[in-house]
Amino acid sequence: ESDGKLSGSKKSVVDDERDFFKITEINFTLYYQPLIPCVNRLRRKVFPGGGRWRDPNPKLYLEMKEILRAAQDDLKELEG
């Protein structure tokens, strides 16, 4: 599949949050479903407004790490 077709088919997953949740519910196993909110927060951070950054965000990596740390803490609470 060409890069253009592939990126077009993946774009709807990024653009539309409802599509994202529908796809993750189907494709994430029960074991990984607790990660869906974290992956969605990462998706919104990396693709603000469902698109790509127009200007570079030098804090993006740090913000992504913060999301992952918070998810790690949330998962520890779930495990009890």
Image (tube, grey):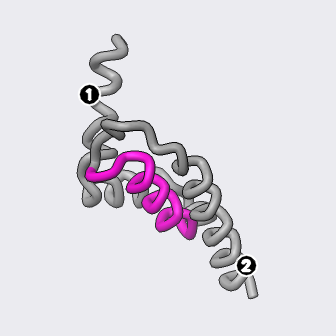
Q: Is residue 42 above or below residue 35?
A: above
Range of residues picked out in magenta:
33-49
Direction from residue 21 to residue 68 in the image, left or right: right
Q: Between 39 and 45, which is closer to the camera in this rendering? A: 45
- Principal secondary structure, stretch drawn in magenta: helix
Dot 2, how many residues are within 10 Å of its Cα: few (below 14), some (14-19), or many (20+)?
few
In the foreground, 49 or 11: 49
User: Residue most toward the bottom?
Assistant: 80
Which residue type carries mark 2? Answer: Lys
What's the residue at 25%, 60% (across, down)?
Answer: 18
Does dot 1 land on a helix, a strand or a loop? Answer: helix
**Residue tagged 2:** 76
Outermost top residue? 2
69 horizontally vs 45: left or right: right
Residue 12 in the image: x percent, y percent?
Answer: 25, 42
- Looking at the rendered image, the quarter that the C terminus falls into is bottom right
Name the residue that disc number 1 marks: 8
